[in-house]
Image: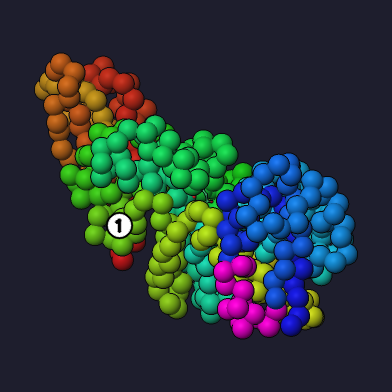
Amino acid sequence: MKRLNIGILGFGTVATGVADLIRENHAEISRRTGYEFLINNIFVRSLDRANPYNLPLTTNINEIIMNPEIDVVVELMGGIEPSLTYIKTALEQNKHVITANKALIATHGNELFKLAAEKGLMLMFEASVAGGIPVIKSLRESLIGNKIESLAGIINGTGNYILTEMKEKGRSFSDALADAQALGYAEADPTFDVEGIDAAHKLTILASIAFGIPLQFDKVFIEGISKLESDDIKYADQLGYTIKHLGIAKNLSEGIEIRVHPTLIPKKELISNVNGVMNAVLVKGNAVGPVLSYGAGAGGHPTASSVLSDLADISRMLDADKEHYVPYLAFQNQALSNAPILPQAEIYTAYYLRIKAVDQPGVLSDITHILAHHDISIELMIQTKSVEDNLANIIMTTHETKEKAILDSIRQIEALTNITGDTTLLRIESFGS
Ligand code: HSE
């Protein structure tokens, strides 16, 4: 039996999952690939740690990245440095690389793919987006006959877990976050989860693969869920919507939208019903129509399942000519497009507004006058008494309009004498499936 020699960097939840799967599923893996997967060595910070299968451990990184016996280096440490330096060195040493590191691919992928291409090596990252869902492979390979028009995803399990717990159990934001951390879903810095940075890393990668553009994390519009109020979850529910933290990318003739923000979605749509730590990615291709992939977006075994898929691909391509590799970002490296990423103020969508106003005659007419002046059409409106004396919550949804128009309107509405506090602005999307 041929052998694939693997060096792993890091021995956390995902690396432990990889070790578990290689042990539990080795017969199935060999039947499928014709290879035995062997973990030669694992780079750890300290040898004083749990090691259930007595795998070889080292605190000397060179024993992996400079070791000529190792075919593939699997980076599962996370963070930018030293992972970036280790991956570059591994590529320079002619090793194929697999990483689950979305932050690294989103922010340094362009230079890493260039280096890998120069060396004729594979650099794979299925585990970097949506945990166990094979979304990269399906976009890059199975949907190759389509022009991808748009994608929308719940791509952060921690955020989805928090929103689900808040909505279904009325739990507080901080309680639900503490649970997600204890369950091992959250990033080392959980602000990456709740402020949308983790989702933006993943969306950057998906948008590149879907539309054939370079990775452009710095152009993604990002809004988190930490300021979302339970009142808005409740009002959205009354209006027939669920709020999800979505990553959305659209390929339009005038440019590309890439944005992460809390989003109201009609309750009847499938993606509205993706709950807990589960992730889902909805892709629309011009031939296939909508395709929804659903699965565990975080956790050791699901993420390790994606790492194993990359290991299998590498084992199959080890002796192949590099021209036969699937391109890193799904499109030929020299064929990436320079389509502009649209500024957020230029996007068109529908909106949810919650305005706090003094409850007296004329207030509503002032508000609707401003919206009409900006050519914004109101879809529906409810007014509720606020707990504060003589204040009303005016909740409105609009038809599709330009974001700049809604922002300009809010500025004028907030300047009215009878309006108090900040207006809540959320976006509404409907995917029709
Ligand atoms: N913190 C991430 C999440 C882990 O909650 O989805 C998987 O990338």
Seen from the viewer's position, the closer of residues 30 and 262 is 30
Quadrant for the C terminus in the image: bottom left
Name the residue located 17 percent from the left edge and 44 percent from the top edge: 238
> At label 1, which amino acid type do we have?
Asn
The picture quadrant where one finds residue 269 is bottom left
Q: Which residues are magenta?
A: 22-35
- Residue 98 visible from this viewpoint: yes
Residue 365 place in picture, x, y as percent:
17, 30
Residue 130 position (above or below residue 221): below
Quadrant for the N terminus in the image: bottom right
| Element type at mark 1 | helix
What secondary structure predominates along the stretch shown in magenta? helix
The picture quadrant where one finds residue 34 is bottom right
Seen from the viewer's position, the closer of residues 374 and 433 is 433
Seen from the viewer's position, the closer of residues 260 and 43 is 43
Name the residue located 75 percent from the left edge and 56 percent from the top edge: 56
The picture quadrant where one finds residue 98 is bottom right
Residue 338 place in picture, x, y as percent:
65, 58
- Residue 347 visible from this viewpoint: no
Q: Which residue is mark 1?
A: 273
Image color mode: rainbow
Looking at the image, residue 116 sits to the left or right of residue 413; the answer is right
Name the residue located 20 percent from the left edge and 29 percent from the top edge: 393
Q: Does the magenta segment cover residue 25?
A: yes
Residue 246 position (above or below residue 196): below
